[in-house]
Amino acid sequence: MALIELNNVTAGYNRDHPAIENVDLSVKKNDFMAIIGPNGGGKTTLLKVVLGLLMPFKGEVRVFGESPTHSRKKIGYVPQVIPSGTFPVSVLEVVLMGRMGSAGLFKKYTESDRNIAAQKLEKLGVAHLAGKRIDQLSGGQKQRVLIARALTGEPELLLLDEPVASVDSETQHSFYNLLSNLNSRMAIVLVTHDVGAVSSHVKSIACINKHLVSHGETISEKDVAQAYGCPFELIAHGVPHRVIGAREDRDHG
């Protein structure tokens, strides 16, 4: 049974101009899927539909065989990195937020909740940062804290929305290795623009630009060019990608 099944799903914020349209997509147990596509192509909308935060205008969504709202406790979600600025909350407090499902909004965290949070911080290599404020961390450190928060709920599925958008290439490489290790115990769906860096780690790729252009272990340059509007070499597991032609509106000088 697929963990995620989208059947003919149309969704967005305006029924007359949906962000995604007629999307059929499935994610299997222990899959590691990258969702790629241009800005405004509907990638984040798709994640919100899977999380049950956005109801489709039409079509059916099943997560773990149930409606997304009934499956949310089985899903860990990592949003884009927290923006810079004042955010006077400790790392431990941020990670404990992942236990709200068990503690309840107005209940105190239990000793078990705190132990699990500490274990996840240790696993992600940031236990020494537990007492620091989240806004004092680097982008890479914030990434690991947000993953620790997502993992405290003991999820079977991890969703990440462009988590490496603001970190350097060395940190990205370490981050993708971390996700590959986690993938041995859970399915992962990663929204990303960094196709080249992630292509050697993922097991499947879904390319979306309002419609699902292609989905599978390999994606042809024709399919990706259709989504992005510029030619790409073949993208496949273990094969890096690079742009082989410039967009028409780019300076060729």
Image (spheres, rainbow, N blue to C red):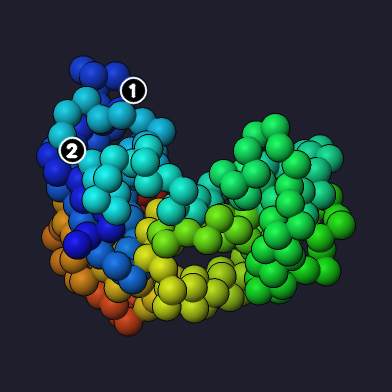
**Left or right, residue 41 beside residue 122:** left
Placement of 210 over or under 126, stated as above or below: above
Q: Residue at point 49% right, 54% down?
A: 76
Question: Residue 222 or 21: which is nearer the viewer?
Answer: 21
Q: Using a 10 Å C-alpha cutoff, classify the residue at mark 2 as few (fewer than 14 neighbours), some (14 to 19) or many (20 or more).
A: some
**Residue 74 placement, left or right of 212:** right
Residue 120 screen position, x and y as percent = 66, 67
Work out whether residue 109 or residue 196 is closer to the camera in this orientation and state it.
Answer: 109
Work out whether 250 lies above or below 198.
above
Picture coordinates of residue 238, whole percent (x, y):
32, 82
Q: CA distance from mark 2 to mark 1?
A: 17 Å
Residue at numbered disc 1 = 13
Q: To which quarter of the image does residue 28 belong?
A: bottom left
- Circles 2 and 1 in contact, beta carbons < 8 Å: no
Q: Circle 2 sits on which residue? A: 60
Amino acid type indicated by mark 2: Glu
The spot of residue 203 in percent (x, y) is: 30, 73
Element marked by disc 2: strand
Q: Quadrant of the N terminus?
A: bottom left
Q: In this rendering, does residue 146 appear at all?
A: no
Q: Secondary structure at mark 1?
A: loop
Q: Residue at x 34, y 61 (%)?
A: 34
Mark 1: which amino acid? Tyr
Using residue 105 as the reference point, say whether residue 59 is left or right of it.
Answer: left
Where residue 141 sits, quadrant-wise, is bottom right
Mark 1 Cα-neighbour bin, 10 Å: few <14, some 14–19, many ≥20: few
Name the N-terminal-most of marks 2 and 1.
1
Question: Residue shown at 73%/52% (left/top)?
Answer: 110
